[in-house]
Image: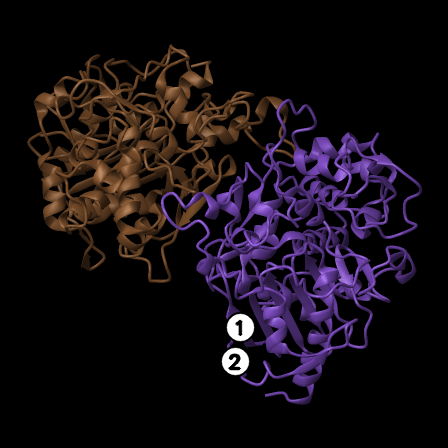
Chain colours: A purple, B brown
């Protein structure tokens, strides 16, 4: 991943059709520890240890091991306020038996322990909750317990949950055309797509994510959204919304799942339009404040001041755990119903497995995608938020377990982490069910 | 102030030789209320109500009434952590008699009340403390009590106080040449300047701040520091430190006060070099944590990740009050000695009035500048932190009063605010001394 443009482009994906193993040609988690490597230490840091937006070095590995815990130092951002209320309680009852839980990796079928998987996945921070208490909590690299980390595409599940809530409240009609709320998109591919189709990413878009092709549409999107430096003489769109207007239709909507981040940008825009609020304000009022978050989060913004709905959320790991645990508990947390139980139940039920299968995710057989969540349809009814490079909120209702992870895995597609993650989650769920405390 | 480049350039100044009155050709404070005007409201905001970095609109009036409370949405920033300690107490005993306190404006010699001055100065937030309690607290425009506001050049006084403390601790030698600590600056104007000369801004620099001249050095500085968009084909320095290396000497050091922000950038670099820490870490450890600040602050950073020492601090008004009150109390606050008493006493004593007079500030006769503070030498021993467009921490030891103000005055030089500010502070001090509660 020497090409930072390639790395960023891939970072828009949260899955891939490959079922790769941990990359042997990269420094491992310990060797790439960003503190030990000295990234951005010194005044100024040495040139070979400086990470910048303008030269795209912020997206290279191992620099990302620093970058993902320092996003605001590279981009304009806006706060997601927790308000002035009390912090909600997260009981801690750490267990020492989890590191030894064993599982078999996908594909390679190798034995591995939970403890080994944490390093193999370049974990920056991980919290496991069982029956409402933190039973495992670790931090590595540049992430401190009180630090912020970018959630990448796990952001989508926050935004999707809010949109689904607005649907439940009757403020947004899932069957309505997007153009009913956003007439600006009337002539784009999204104009005749329904709210439900962008939420489930079944839109038919003439929008390629071929990162070997410098003319791929994805490049134009990230440049418009201020996620990458723009070349001299750049004359394309300068905001996310303006980019969305240019996306053309290809094929029919509603036929197949196709993971394209521009859908989430439309969802974020819909949320802002129907609430009359900026996305970060909605996140604050509907999640940060009622969840009793420990710290303000923040979101990357474009030159319109619009928060990057598809991947711009940064938050504390324990606050990520509060959100994830709320989903496990059917929307109830901190003594109140925060998201309607029916909304969570609908997410957990998922969408069409047949539509999903067309996308060909080798590590996710039988899964579906609904309201910006990845749904396993396994025996435990597990569903996930997934962000590139290993960000995860894994909800296992039957095991009464939720797991949140921040990571900086060298490769940008979660298909690379799944072999050492999904069976590990399963093994942990079984262990916790068999050995509750 | 139609030219945003001109506005920014002026924003590097905190005083001027003019003694202007409130500008009659600008909307007044009420008419320019940024919420009522609708800046950045909507998704997207209407084009005529959108504020951007890339077109420099963020520096125009009345846009600055929004911008100054939303700085992080326009720039990369880094947090100044308050740590996990308890918030220090700020007793509140608001009084209703202060708005009616009268004074005579400088220059125009017009009668005005304190309450009128608050509006005349386009105040965004103001706190008056007397004998350790908040006796007056108001918020206007885009600033909420829990919100952040840019301190502009009041930042310099935070940095100068820390540098002076490092001198007192023997970690920095005031009489040493800057090049002893920063060999990178050996061939610049700063190479043979002493630490004390950059702290007191008596360096002789071939550095113009002529904002009518597009080739003025100040333009190059702000572009290098990422404070302004760079033109196509820009090939100058891309960090503050790299810019400092290019500043040439003119005349002799130590002869005259000349307010040039590049001096403070050197001070900030010195602090980072001798502590081995980033500036925001030093601010956290030496001020934010011991002061028991209510909220994390944040600083704008350049593409080296270096905090903008001359003007990049954003903080909550009440936290600004904690800092200012600590200075009033001889460095003691929150039950501990935070800055050595001798350091505060030395700042309050000021420096050469004769050197200061050469700069010709009409509103500041008999003042001096020492360790990045403005010292009045008045009967009450008052001294100030001053930031462009009206940012202020005014310490009046004899009256046991401190005042902090955030503002977004249309013009960029504090000489315009002094006529309705300095006599107001004096009148308030007299009133509080005569009528203590």
How packed mark 1 is, by other alpha carbons closer than 10 Å (few <14, some 14-19, many 20 or more), is many
Q: Which residue is mark 1?
A: A137
Using the rendered image of the protein, determine whether residue B397 is visible from the camera's viewpoint: yes
Which chain letter goes with mark 2?
Answer: A
Q: Is residue B424 left or right of residue A240?
A: left
Distance from disc 1 to disc 2, alpha carbons, whole Å, reads 7 Å
Judging from the image, what secondary structure is the residue with disc 2 in? Answer: loop
Q: Earlier in the sequence, mark 1 or mark 2?
A: 2
In the foreground, A127 or A121: A121
Which chain letter goes with mark 1?
Answer: A
Q: Which residue is mark 2?
A: A94
Q: Position of residue A259 (x, y in %)?
A: 79, 50
Q: Is residue A341 left or right of residue B338?
A: right
- Snapshot quadrant of residue A26: bottom right
In the foreground, A181 or B92: A181
Q: Residue at x 17, y 23 (%)?
A: B257
Q: Residue at x 67, y 62 (%)?
A: A23
Judging from the image, what secondary structure is the residue with disc 1 in? Answer: strand
Q: Residue at x 66, y 45 (%)?
A: A8
Q: Residue at x 92, y 60 (%)?
A: A354
Q: Position of residue B148 (x, y in %)?
A: 41, 42
Q: Is residue B156 left or right of residue A333?
A: left
- Snapshot quadrant of residue B183: top left
Quadrant containing the N terminus of chain B in the rendered view: top left
Q: Position of residue B122 (x, y in %)?
A: 36, 26
């Amino acid at each position: 991943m020497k090409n930072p443009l390639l790395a960023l482009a891939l970072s828009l994906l949260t899955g891939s059709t490959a079922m790769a193993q941990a990359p042997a040609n990269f420094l491992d988690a310990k060797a790439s520890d960003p503190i030990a490597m000295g990234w951005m230490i010194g005044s100024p840091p040495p040139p070979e240890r400086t990470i910048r937006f303008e030269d795209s070095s912020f997206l290279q590995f191992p620099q990302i091991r620093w970058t993902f815990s320092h996003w605001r130092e590279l981009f304009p951002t806006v706060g997601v306020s927790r308000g002035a209320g009390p912090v909600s309680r997260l009981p801690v009852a750490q267990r020492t038996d989890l590191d030894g839980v064993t599982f078999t990796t996908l594909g390679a079928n190798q034995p591995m322990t939970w403890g080994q998987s944490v390093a193999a996945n370049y974990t920056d921070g991980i919290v496991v909750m069982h029956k409402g208490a933190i039973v495992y909590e670790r931090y590595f690299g540049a992430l401190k317990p009180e630090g912020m980390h970018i959630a990448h595409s796990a952001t989508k599940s926050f935004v999707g949950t809010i949109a689904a809530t607005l649907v439940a409240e009757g403020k947004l009609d899932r069957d309505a055309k997007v153009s009913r709320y956003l007439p600006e998109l009337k002539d784009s591919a999204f104009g005749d797509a329904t709210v439900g189709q962008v939420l489930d990413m079944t839109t038919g878009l003439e929008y390629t994510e071929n990162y070997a092709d410098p003319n791929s549409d994805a490049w134009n999107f990230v440049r418009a959204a201020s996620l990458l430096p723009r070349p001299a003489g750049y004359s394309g769109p300068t905001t996310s919304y303006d980019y969305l207007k240019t996306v053309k239709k290809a094929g029919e909507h509603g036929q197949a799942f196709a993971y394209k981040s521009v859908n989430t940008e439309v969802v974020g825009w819909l949320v802002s339009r129907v609430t009359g609020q900026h996305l970060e304000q909605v996140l604050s009022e509907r999640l940060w404040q009622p969840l009793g978050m420990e710290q303000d989060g923040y979101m990357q913004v474009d030159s319109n001041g619009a928060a990057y709905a598809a991947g711009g959320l940064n938050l504390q790991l324990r606050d990520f755990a509060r959100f994830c645990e709320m989903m496990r508990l059917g929307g109830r947390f901190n003594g109140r119903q925060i998201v309607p139980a029916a909304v969570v139940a609908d997410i957990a039920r998922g969408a069409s497995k047949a539509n999903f299968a067309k996308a060909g995710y080798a590590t996710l057989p039988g899964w579906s995608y609904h309201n910006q969540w990845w749904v396993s349809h396994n025996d435990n009814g597990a569903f996930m938020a997934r962000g590139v490079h290993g960000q995860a909120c894994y909800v296992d209702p039957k095991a009464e377990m939720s797991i949140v992870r921040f990571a900086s895995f060298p490769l940008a597609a979660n298909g690379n982490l799944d072999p050492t993650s999904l069976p590990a989650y399963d093994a942990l769920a079984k262990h916790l069910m068999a050995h509750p405390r």
